[in-house]
Amino acid sequence: MQTSPPPAPDRGPAAPRARPRLVFRTQLAHGSPTGKIEGFTNVRELYAKIAEAFGIAPTEILFCTLNSHRVDMQKLLGGQIGLEDFIFAHVRGETKEVEVTKTEDALGLTITDNGAGYAFIKRIKEGSIINRIEAVCVGDSIEAINDHSIVGCRHYEVAKMLRELPKSQPFTLRLVQPKRAFDMIGQRSRSSKCPIEAKMSSGRETLRLRAGGAATVEEVPSEFEEEASRKVDDLLESYMGIRDPELASTMVETSKKTESVQEFARCLDSVLGEFAFPDEFVVEVWAAIGEAREACG
C-alpha cells in the first residue's frame, strides 16, 4: 500500500534576503596602506570614517576621488559611489598665498566644494587671470580671501564673493594644495573644456549619499538622467561659476515630478531655496532637461 508523504510544515513567507554590508576600500592619495570603511550615510560621515581608519582629523581631508589617486576632477567623489569603487582621500598639503589683481569681470575659476566645509578649484579657464598665475592649481582649496576665512562656506557663496570683488584692486587668496605623491609633483591641470564627467560606478548599483536622510543603494543613472545632469551642471558653471553634479542631479530629479516650468520653479524654491536661482536660469535648466529627454527618447 502506497502512502503519500506528509505535507511540509508551513514556515510562513520567506524572509527577505538581507543586503550584505557595504564595505569600501580606501587609501590616502599621496600613499598609505589600504583601509576599509562602512556605516556612513553622508559625506561628513564618510570623511570621519576615513579619518578614523588612518588616524587623522576629518578636517585634514580636502576631497576624495574615485579609482584614481591623482587630482583628477573627472573622478571627483560627488553624491554617488559605485559599490565597487575605490576611494582615495586627498589631504591638506602646503599652504600658499597669492596676490591677484582683478582686471576683468571673471577670474576664470570654477568652484566646487567637498560637502564638508571646504571650497576648492575644480577648473581654470585657459587664458584667464588665474591661468596666468602659475602657483594656483586645480584641486587647491580656498581657505581665505583677504585674510577672511571662508571655511564652512558653500561653493556658490565663495563664487559670489569672488565675483563681487572690485576690479583693479589687488586681493589675496590663501590656498591649501593637496598633499601629493612623488609622481604627481609638478602636475597642474587646467581645462577650458567641459568633458562629460566619468561614470563613477563599475557595477549596476551606486550608494547615493544625501545631505539629509540616510544613504540609499540605487541603480546607476539612466542615459537621460546622465545627459540632463551634465547639461544642468554646465549651466551651473556658466551662471554661477560652480560645478556640482549632485546639485544638478537633484534638479533633474525635481523636474521629473513637475509638468511645467512654473511648477518646477516652485519646487526648486522649496527644495533648494538657499541658492536663490534667477528666473532666467530656471527657464534654461527646464529647457536643457527637456532637450535631454528628447535626445534620449
Image (cartoon, rainbow, N blue to C red):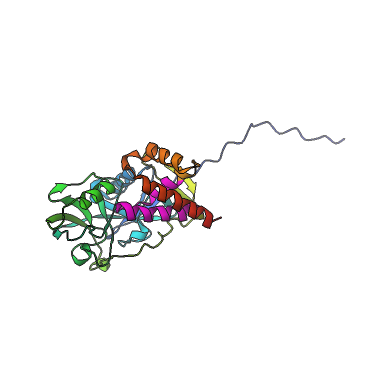
Residue 102 occupies quadrant? bottom left
Give the x, y percent position of residue 26.
Answer: 35, 54
Residue in the image at 41% along x and 61% along y: 196
Give the x, y percent position of residue 145.
Answer: 16, 51
* Of 93 and 293, the residue lying toward us: 293
In this rendering, would 12 be left or right of 146?
Answer: right
* Of 71 and 97, the residue lying toward us: 97
249 is within the stretch colored magenta: yes
* Of 109 and 114, the residue lying toward us: 109
Residue in the image at 20% along x and 60% along y: 104
Residue 140 occupies quadrant? bottom left
- Magenta segment's dominant SS is helix
In this rendering, would 174 be left or right of 32?
Answer: left
Residue 129 occupies quadrant? bottom left
Give the x, y percent position of residue 66.
Answer: 37, 57
Q: Is residue 255 above or below residue 228?
A: above
205 is within the stretch colored magenta: no
Quadrant in which the N terminus is drawn: top right
Residue in the image at 35% along x and 64% along y: 193
User: Which stretch did the figure color magenta?
Assistant: 224-252
* Of 280 and 170, the residue lying toward us: 280
Residue 48 in view of the camera? yes
In this rendering, would 264 be left or right of 239?
Answer: right
Residue 214 in view of the camera? no
